[in-house]
């Protein structure tokens, strides 16, 4: 299996170069730095060789957010330490630049393709002293070469779904070889721990999801838009996927029977869909507005469709009631759910559908503190909203503090394991 994988990655390398060039043309890759993924001449290590280098690889924005508190804490408690962060997506690269710009010992690069000659050259160039891969980033050529060089290696916030477990189970010996390249696997949930144990992986631990460690930022809407929202009864549907906006609009029409001044805020997971959501709103004869960054909310809006990144926390801070998407679509059952932690840490009442496989442990915890609850259809959500929309937003600081303490404990335990790994 390993020979087949290496042969295929070598064989497909020219095609992957063409693909990345094409992605650059459609603005899905960095105009200049796309070369970091495919050419060893662009690896360019920028580090103090007398310092230790910790390398963290996180694919996209969610994984990157989860390790930023970890990196900040490690940096605070260790001198003579440099960090390399690799990511895959443009949005995650921007996040590193924004959230870690004050740290001079941070380097960001795009993750190179898992092709053997690139792998060896990347490791030769950067010479890391510790490597942490995050979530489900499993790249066999990298992992086996790292193991061969005896560089301490950890899987952080590891996530194995039922679907991926079934795939690995077909190649059980290969899976055992790959996952045992890690000196420690720290999983994000108990299901992942159980799946790795079934694959005969050694040294697995579970402390909880690192996403609980991400601090809640205080972000406020501008005064004009806040004043505009104060004229409405407002609720928010966040991270919605195609098909869920229909559910939201039906909810709106039902609640509107009770509250004429109702405003539904829809923040789609993928903002390129805003035009199609507006067209759907128009079919229901609802006044809708696509709100771009810096624009003013219309006084006659009934449906507000957010067309900007990084705005979730602003609306979570304002709205008492939040529906979290990717949870009402049956065909996404095996990958359902979006992260509700941001909303929970803003004191929101959270609603979700029945399909939350990716976050079921988190939702179980939030439900135990009466923070979240499941709804089955739009009439169920409508009833809950009608009950709550007359209430002022009251942030339960005790519940938020419980979540913060829980996240801090996960952070401390993870750092302890990293420190133990480096000392070996």
Image (cartoon, rainbow, N blue to C red):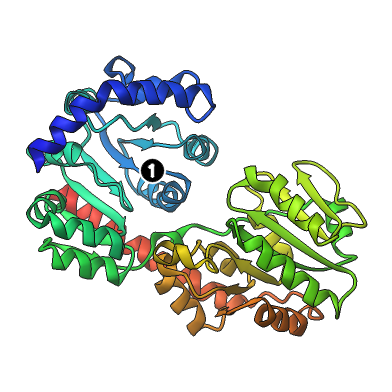
Residue 146: x and y in percent read 15, 38
Residue 196 position by quadrant: bottom left
**In this view of the protein, which residue sits in the foreground, 19 or 408?**
19
Q: Is residue 343 above or below residue 349?
A: above
Residue pictured at 55% horizontal, 69% vertical: 328
Q: Is residue 207 above or below residue 143?
A: below
Q: Is residue 52 left or right of residue 95?
A: left
Residue designated by label 1: 59
**In this view of the protein, which residue sits in the foreground, 279 or 241?**
279
Viewport quadrant of the N terminus: top left
Q: Residue furthest top?
A: 41
Residue 249: x and y in percent read 73, 66
Residue pictured at 27% horizontal, 35% vertical: 53
Specify few, some or many for label 1: CA neighbours under 10 Å numbering under 14, 14-19, or 20 or more: many
Residue 65: x and y in percent read 46, 50
Residue 245 position by quadrant: bottom right
Residue 139: x and y in percent read 23, 42
Residue pictured at 41% horizontal, 65% vertical: 358
**In this view of the protein, which residue sits in the foreground, 160 or 108?**
160
Q: Is residue 359 above or below residue 168?
A: below
């Amino acid at each position: 299996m390993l020979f087949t994988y290496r042969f295929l990655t070598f064989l497909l390398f020219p095609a992957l170069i063409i693909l990345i060039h094409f992605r650059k043309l459609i603005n899905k890759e960095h105009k200049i730095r796309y070369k970091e993924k495919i050419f060893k001449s662009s690896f360019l290590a920028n580090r103090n060789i007398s310092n230790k280098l910790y390398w963290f690889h996180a694919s996209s924005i969610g994984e990157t957010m989860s390790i930023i508190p970890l990196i900040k804490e490690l940096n605070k408690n260790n001198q003579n330490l440099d960090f390399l962060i690799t990511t895959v997506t443009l949005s995650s690269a921007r996040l590193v630049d924004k959230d870690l710009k004050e740290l001079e010992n941070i380097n960001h690069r795009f993750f190179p393709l898992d092709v053997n000659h690139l792998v060896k050259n990347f490791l030769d160039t950067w010479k890391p002293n510790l490597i942490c891969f995050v979530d489900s980033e499993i790249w066999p050529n990298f992992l086996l070469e790292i193991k061969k060089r005896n560089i301490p290696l950890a899987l952080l916030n590891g996530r194995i779904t039922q679907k991926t477990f079934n795939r690995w189970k077909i190649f059980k010996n290969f899976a055992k070889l790959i996952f045992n390249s890690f000196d420690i696997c720290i999983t994000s949930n108990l299901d992942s721990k159980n799946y790795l144990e079934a694959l005969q992986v050694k040294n697995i631990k579970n402390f909880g999801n690192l996403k609980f460690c991400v601090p809640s930022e205080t972000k406020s809407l501008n005064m004009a838009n806040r004043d505009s929202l104060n004229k409405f009864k407002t609720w928010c549907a966040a991270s919605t996927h195609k098909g869920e906006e229909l559910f939201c609009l039906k909810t709106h029409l039902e609640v509107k029977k009770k509250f004429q001044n109702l405003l539904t805020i829809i923040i789609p997971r993928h903002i390129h869909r805003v035009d199609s959501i507006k067209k759907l709103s128009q079919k229901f004869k609802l006044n809708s507005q696509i709100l771009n960054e810096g624009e003013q909310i219309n006084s006659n809006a009934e449906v507000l469709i957010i067309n900007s990144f990084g705005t979730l926390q602003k609306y979570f801070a304002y709205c008492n009631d939040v529906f979290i998407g990717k949870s009402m679509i049956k065909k996404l059952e095996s990958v359902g759910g979006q992260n509700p932690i941001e909303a929970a840490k803003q004191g929101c009442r959270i609603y979700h559908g029945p399909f939350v496989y990716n976050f079921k442990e988190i939702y179980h915890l939030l439900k135990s503190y009466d923070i979240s609850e499941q709804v089955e259809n739009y009439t169920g959500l409508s009833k809950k909203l009608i009950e709550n929309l007359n209430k002022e937003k009251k942030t339960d600081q005790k519940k938020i503090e419980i979540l913060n303490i829980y996240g801090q404990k996960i952070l401390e335990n993870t750092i302890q394991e990293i420190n133990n790994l480096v000392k070996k």
